Each structure stands twice: as C-alpha cells, then as structure tokens.
Image (cartoon, helix red, strand yellow):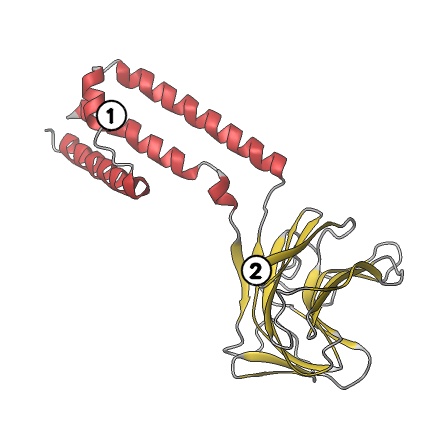
C-alpha cells in the first residue's frame, strides 16, 4: 500500500499546483462594492436632493443650470474628505464601475452619469476628474477636468442608438492602467487612452434640470497587476510547478514501474474540472495514512 500512496501524492500535488497557478482565470473581476438601496443609501452621502425609496436612489434637481455630485464613501476605511488616498476603501485605481440610471422628468438635453478618478491636483490644488454622461435625447459625452484648466471635451455629444431615450440605461466604465472603456447597455461606445488619472474617488453626477434615479451601483477590481507582472507570475508559477512535478516523478520512478504509476494516475477523471480526481486522490491518501498508522 505504501507505494500507491506515493503515486497518489504525485497526482495530488499536480492537481493542487494546477489549481493555484495564477492563470487568466485568476484575473477575473471581483465585485467589492454593490449598492442596490434595498436597506438605505449604503455608502453614498446623505444630501438634500437625493432620497432612497422603493429600492432606488432618487435625485431631484433644483432647476438651476448647474450639476450635483454624489460621492461613494463606503467600505471599511473611507476617506474623511473628498480626496481619498490609495489605502482608503473609496480609492479606486483599476476598476469596472457600473450602474443603472433612469430618466424621469426634466430636460432631455442635459447630462447625467459618472464622475471618475476624483482627486486633488498636486500642483494646482484643484479638482481633477473624468465625466461620462448621457442625455435623455439619446446622446453621450466624455470630458475631463484637470489641473485647474477649463473642461476639456474628449468626446463631444454623440448620438447613439444603444441609448434608451428618456428611459433606463446601464452605464459602465472599465479602467486598466490609462485605458478607459466606456459602455452603454453592455455595448462599448468608446475606448480612450487618458493620461494623468491614476485613481481616486467616484460617484454620480446629474444636471439640476433633471429628475433621475440610479440603482445597482457596483465597482469591481479588474486588474491587480500590470500585464507584464501578470505574465511573469504565470511564467514563474509554471516553472515552479514543472520543477516540483519533475522531482516527484524522479523519486516515484525509483519505487514503481511505469505500469503501476499509469494504473493509479489513470483513475484521474478530468471531467467536472478535475473535482472527481481530486476527491479520489485525497480519499486514497487518507486511506494510506490510516493503514500505515495501523501497521497494515
């Protein structure tokens, strides 16, 4: 029985190492913010023109030609002010932010949507941020405020058939390093390289000439490493896995014939993502240990 324990050890280590290798599946987004307003405003601020009712966050403008901002300041360690540092839970560097935004009444020619990477400019001391807005008439707009300069339009008001006019739309923005991808109703409408916005706070902005609502605000981490770092991690893990398996193979080959090893490893079932094979390997190891302890 002892020699079969060694063969199952090979299978066991191979399965475990394969499972933990940082391949592409480990780079998938993980949601760390989700607000559906079923139990209140969540991590959003309490301001006079936003109210929670019926599981939505409603905004009612004052009719002026200005805009209102609402910041998300939740998590375990939010910043005390509007300028979070990287260690704060409301600082986002690489992200996928999304929300459902609905138009109710008011002007259909003014914007509402996201502001992103809100931070104080280190030189000018003014606010830096990006805006991704839609209008009820079926247009979208992307701009930036940076270093105290006037608003710079990146994409001027542009008509899009994917927008539900004066209705409900799902907006999302994915940031990976300095590349921003903008989506409306799951359709990518723009992809831009924008320098000077490494991260910061985020939230929503609405023209005060509208009454709107939003729901299902979510933020997910999309990249923990740069592509170069990720590629190196995968390469290092593969090399370490191959080295360990080669060493185990060499040791086991000294104790078993090829037929014996093939017979044991042949029990591995790759279906169901290897779950069956892993369970069999663990069970066999446990049996071997029990039998050895009992002197069998």
Q: Secondary structure at mark 2?
A: loop
- Mark in the foreground, 1 or 2: 2
How far from the left and from the top, in percent, is residue 91? 66, 58
Q: Return the residue nearer the eye: 274 or 186.
A: 186
Name the residue tied to disc 1.
Answer: 7
Q: Quadrant of residue 152?
A: bottom right
Q: What number is the disc on residue 188? A: none
Is residue 258 found left or right of 128 in the rendered image? Answer: left
- In the rendered image, the vertical position of residue 283 relative to residue 137, given as above or below: above
Q: Return the residue nearer the eye: 191 or 39.
A: 191
Which residue is found at the position 34% from the left and 34% from the top? Answer: 15
- In the rendered image, the vertical position of residue 124 relative to residue 166, given as above or below: above
Image quadrant holding the C terminus, namely top left
Q: Return the residue nearer the eye: 157 or 59.
A: 157
Residue at the outermost left position: 296
Q: Secondary structure at mark 1?
A: helix
How far from the left and from the top, in percent, is residue 163? 63, 68
Is residue 250 found left or right of 4 in the rendered image? Answer: right
How far from the left and from the top, in percent, is residue 45? 66, 75
Is residue 115 found left or right of 127 in the rendered image? Answer: left
How far from the left and from the top, in percent, is residue 124? 89, 58
Which residue is found at the position 11% from the left and 29% from the top? Answer: 295
Name the residue tied to disc 2.
Answer: 186
Callout 1: few (<14), some (14-19), or many (20+) C-alpha neighbours within 10 Å? many
Image quadrant holding the N terminus, namely top left
Residue at the outermost top position: 254
């Amino acid at each position: 029985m002892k020699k079969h324990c060694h063969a199952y050890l090979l299978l066991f280590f191979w399965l475990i190492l394969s499972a933990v290798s940082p391949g592409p599946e480990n780079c998938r987004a993980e949601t760390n913010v989700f607000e559906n307003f079923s139990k209140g405003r969540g991590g959003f601020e309490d301001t006079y023109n936003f109210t929670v009712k019926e599981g939505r966050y409603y905004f009612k403008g004052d009719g002026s030609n200005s805009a209102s901002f609402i910041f998300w300041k939740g998590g375990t360690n939010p910043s005390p002010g509007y300028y979070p540092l990287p260690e704060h839970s409301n600082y986002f560097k690489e992200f996928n932010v999304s929300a459902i935004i609905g138009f109710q009444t008011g002007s259909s020619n003014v914007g509402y949507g996201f502001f992103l990477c809100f931070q104080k400019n280190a030189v000018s001391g003014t606010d830096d941020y990006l805006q991704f807005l839609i209008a009820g008439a079926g247009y979208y707009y992307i701009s930036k405020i940076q270093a105290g300069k006037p608003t710079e339009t990146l994409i001027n008001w542009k008509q899009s058939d994917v927008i539900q006019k004066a209705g409900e739309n799902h907006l999302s923005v994915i940031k990976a390093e300095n590349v921003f991808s903008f989506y409306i109703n799951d359709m990518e409408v723009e992809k831009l390289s924008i320098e000077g916005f490494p991260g910061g706070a985020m939230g929503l902005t609405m023209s005060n000439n509208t009454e709107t609502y939003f729901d299902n605000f979510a933020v997910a981490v999309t990249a923990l490493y740069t592509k170069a770092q990720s590629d190196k991690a995968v390469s290092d893990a593969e090399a370490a896995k191959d080295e360990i398996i080669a060493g185990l193979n060499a040791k086991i080959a000294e104790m078993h014939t090829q037929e014996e090893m093939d017979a044991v490893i042949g029990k591995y079932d790759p279906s169901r993502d290897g779950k069956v094979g892993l369970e069999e390997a663990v069970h066999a190891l446990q049996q071997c240990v029990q039998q050895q302890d009992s002197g069998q």
